[in-house]
Amino acid sequence: MQLTFEVIAGTLRERIRSGGLRPGDALPTQTVLMREFGASSLTVQKAMALLKQDGWAVSRPGKGAFVAHHDHIADDADGLDGSETTDPVGGTAARVETLERALAEAVEQLADLRARVEALETGGGERGR
């Protein structure tokens, strides 16, 4: 018998496989999943951690969890055995891509902040004279 967090993760994986949730779509919030499955917040968090670990979902800080982008997600029609259908093809590649995007955004933000600080220092130094 599956534990509740495994049931939640499995249900969300099936929604992704079937196209009910598409790459880039927001996953249901913790509150929605708690209500739908009658689960605790910790149980929902464990399910989301499992989905992220397996490459099915990614987090965007301050925005929530989203379906990961994959070139192809294996489905039961591919003739694969059960263990192969639970892992999206390219899951690791998708996580690397997500991390690279996050890093690029962080670098842009740092460059913007650096420019602002330099502008303030230059402008502030002239005012103090």
Image (cartoon, rainbow, N blue to C red):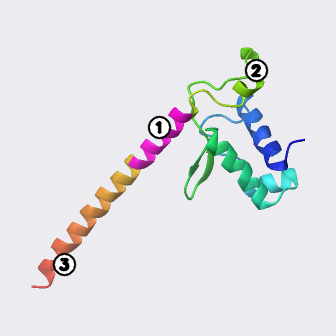
Circle 2: is it few (<14), some (14-19), or many (20+) Cα within 10 Å? Answer: few
Alpha carbon separation for disc pair 2 and 1: 27 Å
Specify start and end residues of the magenta stretch as a single range.
92-103
Which residue: 21% across, 68% down?
A: 119
The image shows residue 20 at horizontal and vertical percentages of 74, 33
Closer to the observer: label 2 or label 3?
A: 2
The residue that mark 2 highlights is 81
37 lies above or below 89: below
The image shows residue 69 at horizontal and vertical percentages of 57, 34
Q: Which mark is residue 124?
A: 3
Label 1 element class: helix
**Which quadrant of the figure has residue 89?**
top right
Toward the bottom, the furthest residue is 128
Label 3 element class: helix
Toward the top, the furthest residue is 79
Instruction: Tell me the kind of residue under disc 3.
Output: Gly
Label 2 element class: loop
Looking at the image, is mark 2 or mark 1 earlier in the sequence? 2
